[in-house]
Image: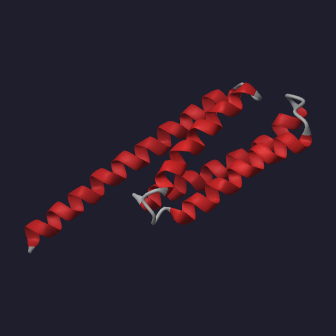
Amino acid sequence: MRHMCATMLTLQAIILGLSIPVMIAVQDVEPLTASLLGGGLAVLCLVTAGLLRQPWAYWIGHAIQVATIALGFLVPIMFFIGLMFAALWLGAFFLGRKIEADKARWAAAGE
């Protein structure tokens, strides 16, 4: 689960970084605001990806999804992109949990 979720957050960090020039050039968001929001979320994605060994870090990952969707108020396409990443995040989260549960069940059956 950790690896799939970390991959999603890493890809999301790239997209959030690329959203900065879009916010500035297309939506006329102040450069400082765009850098703090897009760059801050991108850095938070990378830091959280590294913290996923801790169970509480997944809550930060969920919050990142909400914040990414909320960027749609500045750049409307981010509503769609945020929802897409939220779906990928939740898919990785729940599929990863199912895989870990299956591995634990197989290991217990093999003993």
Q: Is 32 or 23 nearer to us in this picture?
A: 32
In this rendering, the answer to whether 6 lies above or below 73 is below
* Residue 3 in picture, x, y percent from top left: 46, 61
* Residue 62 in picture, x, y percent from top left: 51, 44
Q: Is 22 or 29 nearer to us in this picture?
A: 29
User: Residue at the location (21% across, 64% down)?
Assistant: 104
* Residue 18 in picture, x, y percent from top left: 76, 45
Question: In this figure, what is the number of numbered marks?
Answer: 0
Left/right placement of residue 70 relative to residue 28 reads left
Q: Is 110 or 72 nearer to us in this picture?
A: 72
Q: Quadrant of residue 105?
A: bottom left
List the single residue furthest toward the bottom.
Answer: 111
In this rendering, the answer to whether 64 lies above or below 49 is above
State which quarter of the image contains the N terminus: bottom left
State which quarter of the image contains the C terminus: bottom left
* Residue 35 in picture, x, y percent from top left: 83, 47
User: Residue at the location (52% across, 58% down)?
Assistant: 6
Left/right placement of residue 56 relative to residue 106 reads right
User: Residue at the location (49% across, 62% down)?
Assistant: 52
Q: Quadrant of residue 85?
A: top right
User: Residue at the location (59% across, 44% down)?
Assistant: 64
Left/right placement of residue 99 relative to residue 30 reads left
In this rendering, the answer to whether 104 lies above or below 64 is below
Colour option used: secondary structure
